[in-house]
Image (cartoon, rainbow, N blue to C red):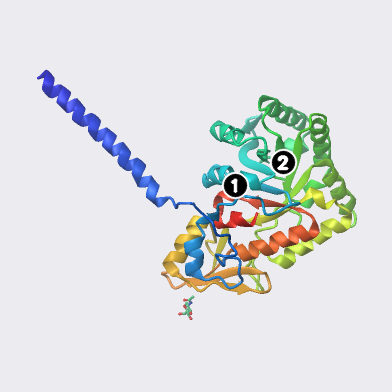
Amino acid sequence: MHLLKNFVYSVLFLLIVVNFSCLAKKTDPSKPKYLPTTKDHKSRRLANKKLNCIRFSKNCFYYNQDLTPQLENTEVLGYITPWNEDGYEFSNLFHSKFTYLSPVWYTATYKNEKIDIGGGPNSEWMGEQESLGKERPYILPRILIENPQLIVNKKLCEEFKKKIFELLSKNPKFSGITIDGVQQIEFLISKPFINFLTDVSKYFQERNLKLILATRIDRQITPTEKPLLLKISKLVDKISLMTYDFPANQQTQALSPLFWLEFIINSLLEIGINPKSLMLGLNFYSRDIPHTHVDIKFYSGNLLMSLLKQKKPKLLWEAVSHENYFDYNDSKGIHHRVHFPSPYSLQTRINLAIKKNIGIAIWEIGQGLPCYFDLF
Ligand SMILES: *[C@@H]1O[C@H](CO)[C@@H](O)[C@H](O)[C@H]1NC(C)=O
């Protein structure tokens, strides 16, 4: 009886172990492998206007094993979102190419009369970064301001600033923070926000901490706004520009047309903003717009590749926006257009940043493909 019982337990145990190892194995093959190669993207003929679908699909998971940074005087910021976990892996593998990393970890809310900076660091990844040595990037986690009352309401704002300072003293390995959530120029230049930035900036400067402001400045700037935007640029170390999600129109469905990027950068430089405090935002994701404009989708590199595999479309170049795209019809016969970052379109934008002497901010690296990193 006793023996039988033992036997049953052993079988049960075995079943559980086998089940677990099956599960573990199941998740592995679905994950694309990132492979080093001795060839750079030029010899793999990836950075071309004319991009071949099959060549691109076959080569995009390879990266050049020579990880020497390609950009000498251009600072690169990489955002990492915990929900696209490849970002952590890429940030470790390509750490030599980044000046700053901004993991998207915190959300500041005001609920039930309580201010909360929700979220927390990924300690395992922090440890991995530390083991990379001295030349590793600065880590500036992002805080998303969800409720404008945290800035507008004087009392709440005082408390919010205290919470930010507390967060930093609790995490001495952070080099500073990235502030996100204020995207209207009207709000950016409002008195409460400028006061908030002034105080945070003072505290940060005294402690040698860095402050990045992620925002969107994509319309004509009025004469009264100019000096205030200039002032803001002096209160922060960098303005990380969200130069993507261009509204689709008759002319183009591009995500980030080059003419628009040039317009935004030029209008900010004309104010007298130091180019060194600007970062051009590059999207690593793609956008799929159906003809009906219903259910617009965004893809990571992995999803883009499975769509390319399935549809095998002809990859085209749009001269007006300087972006690659393709068309396909879905099973219901609805026409779709997908704009995606290609090595060539990315190179064009990197060249613009170099020409204007500004930095680059990538949203976000986990959505990218290994071949993209060869350019940085
Ligand atoms: C989609 O369907 C339309 C109408 O049948 C056709 O004219 C067009 O060539 C198709 N497009 C693609 C990319 O297959």
- Classify residue 152 by image quadrant: top right
Where is residue 206? Give x, y as percent: 82, 29
The residue sitting at the top extreme is: 2
Local crowd size for mark 2, using a 10 Å CA cut-off: few (<14), some (14–19), many (≥20): some
Give residue 341's mark. none
Marks 2 and 1 sit apart, C-alpha to C-alpha, by 36 Å
Residue contact at pointers 2 and 1, CB within 8 angstroms? no
Local crowd size for mark 1, using a 10 Å CA cut-off: few (<14), some (14–19), many (≥20): some
Which of 106/184 is in front? 106
Q: Residue at x 65, y 71 (%)?
A: 252
| Quadrant that contains the C terminus | bottom right
Vertical placement of residue 224 versus 53, above or below: above
Q: Residue at x 64, y 50 (%)?
A: 68
Which of 255/135 is in front? 135
Which residue in the structure is indicated by mark 1?
Answer: 94
Residue type indicated by callout 1: Phe
Q: Is residue 289 left or right of residue 115?
A: left
- Whichever of labels 2 and 1 marks the residue nearer the N terminus, that label is 1
> Under 8 Å from ligand 1: the CB of mark 1?
no
Residue type indicated by callout 2: Pro
Vertical placement of residue 67 versus 106, above or below: below
Where is residue 341? Give x, y as percent: 60, 62
Which residue in the structure is indicated by mark 2?
Answer: 148
